[in-house]
């Protein structure tokens, strides 16, 4: 029977194409991540200057298309592009032709007709960034597609951990909460394990999807297990998914009692992260959110420089470019 | 219960092919002469009687294929498929008979709708086509259709395909009542509270990609329930598109206990696993979903040992714009009539997983028997239902190369081995 397990080579998914887009952390190598984080670090230094704008991407156009509500992701992509002197345009689904029933393909073709260099897209459905990549010539950056991926969030989290906690290799991160519905969790599991960190997922059994351990993480249903981690990463409890009858957990009240991250459940000095927006008093106790060990604002600041690095990287070190100019030298 | 465009019957001599009819015990190089649409003689150096001669040397002549699971989309979605294009696609795939599913708009749940389809088939069908009728009115799982009247009007069987009959009490009544018609019940097994929202097989791939999972138990628990009801009622049943190991094992156990259960499997479930979905190609989205390597192994094993007697394409044409959307937004279903033999020859026969004889039997005699249709056979006196196959030919599947009105095939761009050269359906050359 062993031979049956061999699937024909040409029926397997093709190897990832040259890095032209940022759609999934799974497409990146450890070297890619190291380079992105190093670039982000050099941008962080430039933001300490009085004049924060760099001419690096002058003449390039970055289009942000957001089909889902977002504060920090959309604003930081826009600011990142502006800090690098790119022209930006932001389109929200509400008030656009999407309201008139335009398909994503047609929206992509329309935007593509302006020859943008980068399209940043957030969409509620898995596979939307791939579709945009198929129908435009632009570099596509996934700013969140359904429950699939949110790669720039994972990169900014890596950046934050490295700056505030230390090296990623051998670090132990506990990711707590609704993993099932979380694109942040998926990107972070991939990113952290890629960089040599150990990941433990903690939450109620129905919210830890079957088969997720194949991504190289450990599972625990016991909130007590977070005490062993160097970093506790709290996921947003997606209340809109916890409708009556869904029965992922019997009630938010029981969830909070069992899995809420409270000061009592943390070791002194243990670092806490959260991708936002937070539900204070649900997945995270307000005393934890406001404590000095919470890195939540640092994450937001990191979002800006990491997204600058992503835009810079796609536009300067992609397959079309041979030379990799130092961003500060260009500046 | 099969209907075809009225017209000529052909005269033909196929010379020097390897004539292979496993169910009939025929395997040898000889000539086959067809007189007026009927197989008249098998032998060497046959007189041509001024018939047209087809050179079959190096080719395999087998009984025409039967696909018991096809969506022709009429009435309602003629932009996706019609009887004319669907039967032309089937002919190009080597098929000589296709019972079509009733999941249309409106549904085939009354003799009036069925009657208009029969008329259309008599005007347009390139090969014999049958029409299954729904088990429940509106496929809403509440009330049985008028099965006796539908059978009299020509229904080839009954199915709520695309939907399970959820209520066990109603399923039992359907098993009891349909027996008077002599037609088969064909069941889509899916427990909706387990599959709800599911996009792909639940497992490591769905966990990583973030899709809501459609677990294999959603199928197998319903398979087990329907087999238990069939055993209790002593009635036969046909199980559509099995995808999970547990389902195959349940069918095998029920058959061993004497339940008259037949089952089918699709080419895509035999060729692929859920690993393929990582590309997020909407042409890899179907119900039931592609499952694990272990499930695929169980399906192949079930096909080999006869637990699964039929290969069915579940040919489900979709308009291009409906599939050019993010994976999550795409409808379920892929086409398959024109690629089934080549995909399976390439994927199963060439690597030695399944003998050619078994593949041919499961694509012809198996599905015919499952629906109580006359088995296509290569024997003197039988109607000519033949397919001439070139197992050495390699070809590339092209989006523009389909006779089907839709091209939502998971095989576009792939190179396949094995090509249909000629199809004779009900005594008439339907494709060459």
Image: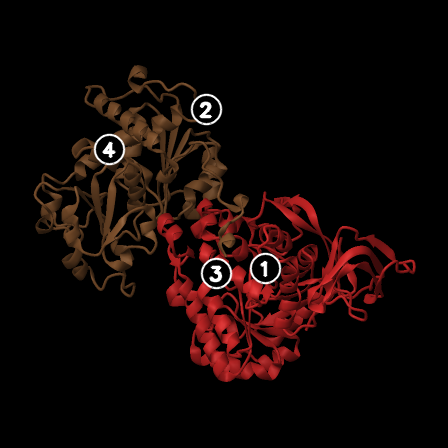
Chain colours: A brown, B red
Q: Secondary structure at mark 4?
A: helix
What residue is shown with label 1? B313
* Cα separation between marks 2 and 4: 27 Å
* Cα separation between marks 2 and 3: 42 Å
- Count residues near mark 4 (Cα–Cα under 10 Å), then give few for <14, some for 14-19, many for 20+: many
Q: Secondary structure at mark 2?
A: loop
- Mark 2 or 4, nearer chain start: 4
Identify the disc placed on residue A159: 4
Say whether marks 2 and 3 touch (CB < 8 Å): no
- Count residues near mark 2 (Cα–Cα under 10 Å), then give few for <14, some for 14-19, many for 20+: few
What residue is shown with label 3? B288
**Residue A174 coordinates in the image, percent (x, y):** 21, 46
Q: In the image, what residue occupies the spot 92% across and 58% down?
A: B50
* Cα separation between marks 4 and 1: 50 Å
Q: In the image, what residue occupies the spot 69% across and 70% down?
A: B375
Picture layout, residue B321 above or below residue B121 = above
Chain hosting mark 4? A
Front one among A76 and A226: A226
Q: Secondary structure at mark 1?
A: loop
């Amino acid at each position: 029977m062993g031979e049956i397990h061999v699937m024909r080579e040409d029926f397997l998914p093709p190897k990832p194409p040259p890095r032209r887009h940022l759609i999934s952390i799974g497409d990146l190598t450890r070297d890619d991540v190291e380079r992105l984080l190093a670039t982000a670090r050099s941008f962080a230094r430039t933001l300490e200057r009085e004049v924060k704008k760099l001419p690096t991407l002058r003449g390039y156009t970055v289009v942000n298309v957001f089909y889902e509500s977002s504060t920090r992701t959309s604003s930081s992509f826009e600011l990142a592009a502006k800090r690098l002197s790119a022209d930006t345009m932001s389109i929200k689904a509400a008030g656009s032709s999407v309201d008139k029933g335009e398909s994503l393909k047609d929206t992509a073709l329309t935007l593509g007709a302006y020859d943008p260099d980068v399209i940043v897209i957030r969409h509620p459905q898995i596979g939307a960034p791939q579709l945009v990549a198929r129908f435009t010539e632009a570099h596509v950056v996934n700013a969140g597609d359904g429950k699939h991926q949110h790669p720039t969030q994972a990169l900014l989290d890596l950046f934050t951990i490295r700056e505030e906690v230390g090296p990623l290799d051998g670090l132990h991160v506990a990711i707590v909460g609704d993993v099932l519905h979380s694109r942040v969790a998926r990107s972070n599991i991939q990113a952290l394990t890629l960089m040599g960190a150990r990941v433990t997922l903690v939450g109620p059994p129905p919210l830890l999807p079957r088969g997720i351990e194949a991504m190289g993480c450990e599972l625990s249903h016991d909130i007590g297990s977070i005490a062993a981690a160097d970093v506790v990463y709290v996921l947003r409890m997606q209340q809109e998914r916890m409708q009556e009858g869904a029965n992922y957990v019997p009630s938010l009240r029981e969830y909070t009692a069992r899995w809420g991250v409270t000061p009592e459940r943390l070791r002194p000095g243990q670092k806490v992260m959260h991708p936002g927006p937070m539900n204070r008093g649900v997945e995270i106790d307000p005393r934890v959110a406001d404590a000095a060990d919470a890195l939540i604002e640092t994450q937001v600041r990191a979002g800006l420089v990491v997204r600058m690095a992503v835009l810079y990287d796609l536009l300067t070190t992609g397959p079309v470019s041979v030379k990799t100019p130092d961003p500060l030298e260009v500046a | 219960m099969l209907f075809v465009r009225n017209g000529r019957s052909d005269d033909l001599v196929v010379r020097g092919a390897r004539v292979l009819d496993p169910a009939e015990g025929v395997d040898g190089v000889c000539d086959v002469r067809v007189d007026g649409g009927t197989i008249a003689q098998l032998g060497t150096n046959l007189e041509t009687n001024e018939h047209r001669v087809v050179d079959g040397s190096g080719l395999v002549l087998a009984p025409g294929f039967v696909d018991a699971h096809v969506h022709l989309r009429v009435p309602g979605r003629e932009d996706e498929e019609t009887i004319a294009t669907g039967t032309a696609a089937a002919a190009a795939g080597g098929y000589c008979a296709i019972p079509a599913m009733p999941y249309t708009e409106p549904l085939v749940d009354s003799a009036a709708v069925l009657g208009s389809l029969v008329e259309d088939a008599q005007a347009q069908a390139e090969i014999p086509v049958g029409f299954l009728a729904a088990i429940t009115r509106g496929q809403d799982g509440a009330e049985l259709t008028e099965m006796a009247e539908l059978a009299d009007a020509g229904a080839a069987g009954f199915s709520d395909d695309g939907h399970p009959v959820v209520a066990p009490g109603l399923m039992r009544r359907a098993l009891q009542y349909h027996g008077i018609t002599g037609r088969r019940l064909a069941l889509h097994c899916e427990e909706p509270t387990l599959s709800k929202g599911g996009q792909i097989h639940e497992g490591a791939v769905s966990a990583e990609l973030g899709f809501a999972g459609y677990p294999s138990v959603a199928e197998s628990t319903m398979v087990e329930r329907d087999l238990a009801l069939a055993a209790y009622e002593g009635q036969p049943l046909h199980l559509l598109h099995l995808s999970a190991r547990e389902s195959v094992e349940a069918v095998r156990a029920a058959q061993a206990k004497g339940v008259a259960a037949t089952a089918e499997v699709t080419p895509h479930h035999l060729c692929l696993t859920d690993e393929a979905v990582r590309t997020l190609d909407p042409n890899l989205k179907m119900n039931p979903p592609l499952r694990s390597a272990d499930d695929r192994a169980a399906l192949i094993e079930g096909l080999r040992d006869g637990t699964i007697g039929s290969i069915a394409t579940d040919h489900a044409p979709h308009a291009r714009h409906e599939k050019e959307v993010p994976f999550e937004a795409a409808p379920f279903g892929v086409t398959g009539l024109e690629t089934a033999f080549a995909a399976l020859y390439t994927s199963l026969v060439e690597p030695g997983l399944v003998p050619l004889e078994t593949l041919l039997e499961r694509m012809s005699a198996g599905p015919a028997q499952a629906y109580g249709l006359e088995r296509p056979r290569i024997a003197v006196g039988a109607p000519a239902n033949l397919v001439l196959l070139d197992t050495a030919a390699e070809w590339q599947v092209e989006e523009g190369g389909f006779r089907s009105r839709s091209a939502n095939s998971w095989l576009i761009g792939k190179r396949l081995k094995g090509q249909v050269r000629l199809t004779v359906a009900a005594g008439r050359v339907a494709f060459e």
